[in-house]
Image (cartoon, rainbow, N blue to C red):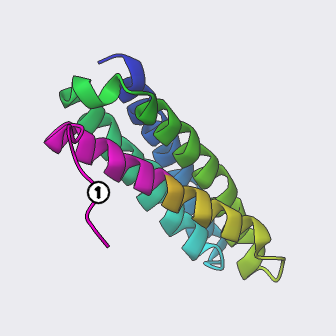
Amino acid sequence: MKGIGLLFFASGAIYGMGGMALGIWMGTAHDFTLAPAHAHLNLLGFVTMSLMGVFYHVTPSAAHRFLARLHFCLATLGVWLMVPGIALSVTGGNPGMAIVGSLLTAAAMLTFLVNLALTAFGPVRGARALPC
């Protein structure tokens, strides 16, 4: 594995370790206030990033597009802002960082969907605008 697939997969592994560490800390402290942040770190950070890594590894045509790199940047920034933003929000802080992280994560998924559509269907050639 190499390239963007490896970046997604390695990031997912790092986020998975972070999620495990947070879960262990919450369990030993018997304080589960940060459970929403823990869940998002595991699902968005570990699961989603790892799945994207596998997708880009098995789909080189999608991996070589600029959209794949944009997807990685948006997804990474989304995790970096959403998870601590959720932690701040559930402990009484401002939810702004979580909101921005959520929007970046949504933009990352939209970027992935466009890349997926281009991979599955290719660019539309000779398409004409529909009459209004």
The answer to whether residue 127 shows anywhere in this view is: yes
Number of numbered discs on residues: 1
Nearest the viewer among 100 and 13 is 100
Task: Residue 87 in the image: state x and y as whole percent.
Answer: 70, 69
Whole-percent x, y for residue 8 in the image:
42, 35
Q: What segment is highlighted magenta in the picture?
A: 108-132
Q: Quadrant of residue 125?
A: top left
Residue 24 seen in render: no
Other residues around mark 1 within 10 Å, as few (<14) / some (14–19) / many (≥20): few
* Residue at point 76%, 76% (across, down): 95
For the residue pair 58 and 24, the one nearer the viewer reads as: 58
Furthest residue toward front: 131
Q: Residue at x 29, y 57 (%)?
A: 129
Q: Is residue 15 left or right of residue 127?
A: right
Q: Is residue 127 above or below residue 3?
A: below
The residue positioned 38% from the left and 27% from the top of the image is 65
Disc 1: which residue: 129
Tag 1: amino acid: Ala
Q: Nearer the viewer, residue 47 or 26?
A: 47
| Image quarter of the N terminus | top left
Q: Is residue 47 found left or right of 66 in the rendered image?
A: left
Query: Percent position (x, y) of residue 76?
Result: 57, 44
105 in relation to 18, above or below: below
The image quadrant where one finds the C terminus is: bottom left
Where residue 61 sits: x, y (%)? 24, 25
